[in-house]
Image (cartoon, rainbow, N blue to C red):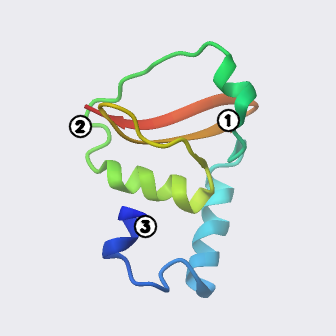
Amino acid sequence: MDPWRVNSPSDSRTGDTYEATVGHLRQVLRGFSPGFGDLQWSGGGYKINVPPAKLPMPVLAREVMVVFGAADLGREDKVDWRYGFTADGVPCMLASTK
């Protein structure tokens, strides 16, 4: 069971409002793509730490990734969640870490 859905109504990710939200996110995130595969894992990457003051509610960032359809890359030691996507063809990952 997805722990995010525990506090959400069962129909919160369906219906016209949800589809409108997805459509809006796709316009705002133009250039972003939810595609992320094994090829992206094999390449090098950069790590940028975002201070909590710049992203005070990581749960909202996670919800954007879920609605956007980014690849759920699972959890690890000291990693609560992480999602993979591409931005203008560049592989990216957003994660919540300790």
| Amino acid type, callout 2 | Ala
Name the image quarter holding residue 51.
top left
**Element type at marker 1?**
strand
**CA gap, disc 3 to disc 2?**
30 Å
| Amino acid type, callout 3 | Met
**Element type at marker 2?**
loop
* Above or below: residue 3 compared with residue 14: above
Q: Residues within 10 Å of mark 2 (few under 14, many from 20)?
A: few
Marker disc for residue 1:
3
| Residue 15 placement, left or right of 74 | right
**CA gap, disc 1 to disc 3?**
29 Å
* Above or below: residue 43 compared with residue 60: above
The structure residue drawn at horizontal position 67% and vertical position 68%, both measured from the top left corner, is 23
Residue annotated with mark 1: 87
Q: Are marks 3 and 2 in contact (CB under 8 Å)?
A: no
Q: Nearer the viewer, mark 1 or mark 3?
A: 3
* Above or below: residue 79 compared with residue 11: above
**Residue 27 or 47: which is nearer the viewer?**
47
The structure residue drawn at horizontal position 68% and vertical position 36%, both measured from the top left corner, is 86
Name the image quarter holding residue 67.
bottom right
Residue 90 locus on image (x, y percent): 70, 27
| Amino acid type, callout 1 | Ala
Quick one: label 2 or label 1, which is nearer the N terminus? Answer: 2
Residue 12 locus on image (x, y percent): 47, 81
Residue annotated with mark 2: 53
Q: Nearer the viewer, mark 3 or mark 2?
A: 3
The single residue placed furthest to the top in the displayed view is 44
Quick one: label 3 or label 2, which is nearer the N terminus? Answer: 3
